[in-house]
Amino acid sequence: MQTAIKYSVILPTYNRAKSLSEGLQALARQTVSCSDYEVIIVDDGSTAETKDIVTQFSNTHPHVVLRYERLSRNSGCAKARNQGILKAKGEVLLFTDDDCIVPPTWIQVHGETHARYPEAAGVGGWYFPADDLMQRNIFHQFYDVQFDFAFPQQRNFEIHTNTMRTAAGNTANMSYKRIVFEKNGVFDEVLYFTGGVDWEFKARLIAHGLSLVFVPLVVEHRKELSLSTFVKKTILLGRGHAYRTRKYAPSDLIGLPIPHSLSGALFSYAKWGTYIPRRRAYAHLFALWLSCFLIGKYLNYILGFYPKGEPFRTSVQTTFFRKYDKQGNVVVKEEVQKLPALRQFTHNMITQSEVSPPRYSIIIPTFNRAPFLPHVLHSLVSQSIPLSCYEIIIVDDGSTDETAGVVHEIQAQNSDAQIKYLYQNNGGPAAARNRGAEIARGSILFFVDSDCVVHRDVMRVHLSLYAQSEEIAAVGGGMLTTHTSARVFNRIRHGSFPNAFITQNPDKILITNDVSFKVAPHNGGNLSVKSEVFKKCGRFLAPDNVRGKTANEDVALCFRIQKEGHVMALVPYYAENLRLISFLEFRKMTLTEGRFHHFILQTLNPIPLNLDYRPSRVLVGAACIRALVRPTRLHFVSILQQYYRYQGFRSRDMEHIDK
């Protein structure tokens, strides 16, 4: 009895007979049984001896199930792959290219990963050239460096996510379940050129809430790039990107480091060119890449090559990591548990009956913020969970104003609330938060700034998320100034990722343990952490030799939490900042921020490509260029921000900090 086909390998080809022959030989050496898979060659109107190569291979390898389909004329890779999908018999469809050599375990790894992640729509890896080709071809070297920039630290991680922030999706090394095509359609044949057909399909799946798994599995790319092919490929990439971002909302493509404007391109160029090896050669090559990419992007404007209708929007975004070493072995033996998909967020999604909270400790460090404390404490004692469920700890960090009197007055007015007051000599917010955590009795610590008002449901939402999943170690939100007279210094200080994500996605919850730390809640004025996780990760850093003793200790804590493999959640709740930042305060905060950036890099050794933590003169220049291209007040202030960060980063006070 004939065994049912489990896997269908679809390989479109066009005038690449020699490399096709090598690719077929690799497919014949797979570790799975030949009866379990079929190979479908789709000839996209080749004029070379493609059919002869296929016939010859079939005669010499009769044990391999091989099928040959030919299109009457060259119609593009999308139509060729769709023809293969139509003829495929397997439940899992694998895709590769006619200039790629797959490893012997290729089908086996894809099949096993689909079995481990039955909820995932697809599994994908990446492709790299052979070592000899990499050494002699600068264009391949450029793409190798660009991969690390676009997808930092993904060579050794298995990542399950429903965001665009992994390399999974490239059809040189990709597989999808058959049912995915039946429910979501096939590749978009409007994209008749090779410029992102596979990424358009990936964006469609992400927009529909489906997830993909990236595995550190590499296929060998045999095509030698020349200057002309590099330029052509990049122009088509720009065209495909412009088409995709019009069809799917750009805010949903978080993580893709592809510029959407000339100023964004220049800023990305300056950032990227600062940290790559062989800086001058690659910087010139990157300038060429950006130029060709933007030519392709704006070529679509000229041709009117855009999809019709409103863009799609995504659902809840989640990311999960498993780390692998260079030999492909799992570093962390126990598999990271996958969280259930959370519901589309609304402010009334949680009922009172759902919350059975543990003891909650709210910690407020304060220094000369007496005018704001009544508003802050009123928002905290007015939470929608019972007062008996939480305590409020105010740590006075050496205030010289009426802070103590204000707190005692509020204690008298709210006798039912458990409000504690501590006084210490001025040591900075990190030391004050740590002091509050030492006496806290709650199993969850909620950190709020003394000039921030929180929403009355924020505690209840945090508790609900902790109750839904034990893997969540911390929950945070954004920080915003809503005052009509808010200065530009407030706006630029609050331009971080959490605010941008919440503004663009007010009805979504992001759950992640993304170790690249580009997407995470990290604002200490609106953050809750499990007490045992807080103690395990070493509390807030408070180095004595950082003048100013503030700025980014919350970022350092959140980075350590994610580095330990814990999961964090970002909810669409802002803490409203009541204080208007003056220029002198802005300067002091940004200088100290730069000093702390150096401290973080020296002590935590975060991922080198986390560019926001390496201020440089190039970034100052990039901010100047951006302000000239788009002369807004915000962009001119960003020049000062980058300059002061750089000055703080270079401060000699930070040169002798030990781990």
Image: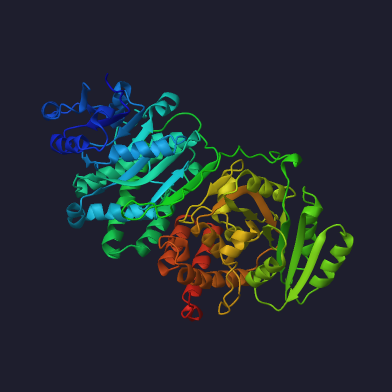
**x and y percentages locating residue 71 in the rendered image:** 22, 22
Q: Is residue 210 above or below residue 450?
A: above
Q: Nearer the viewer, residue 654 or 285?
A: 654
Q: Nearer the viewer, residue 343 or 548?
A: 343
Q: Quadrant of the N terminus?
A: top left
Horizontal arrangement in the rendering, residue 105 relative to residue 354 (left or right) = left
- Name the residue: 82% across, 67% down: 407
Q: Nearer the viewer, residue 503 or 33?
A: 33
Q: Is residue 413 above or below residue 188?
A: below
- Name the residue: 44% across, 60% down: 610
Q: Is residue 376 above or below residue 429?
A: above
Q: Is residue 94 visible?
A: yes
Q: Nearer the viewer, residue 536 or 637?
A: 536
- Name the residue: 13% across, 28% down: 47
Horizontal arrangement in the rendering, residue 493 relative to residue 215 (left or right) = right
Residue 197, image quadrant: top left
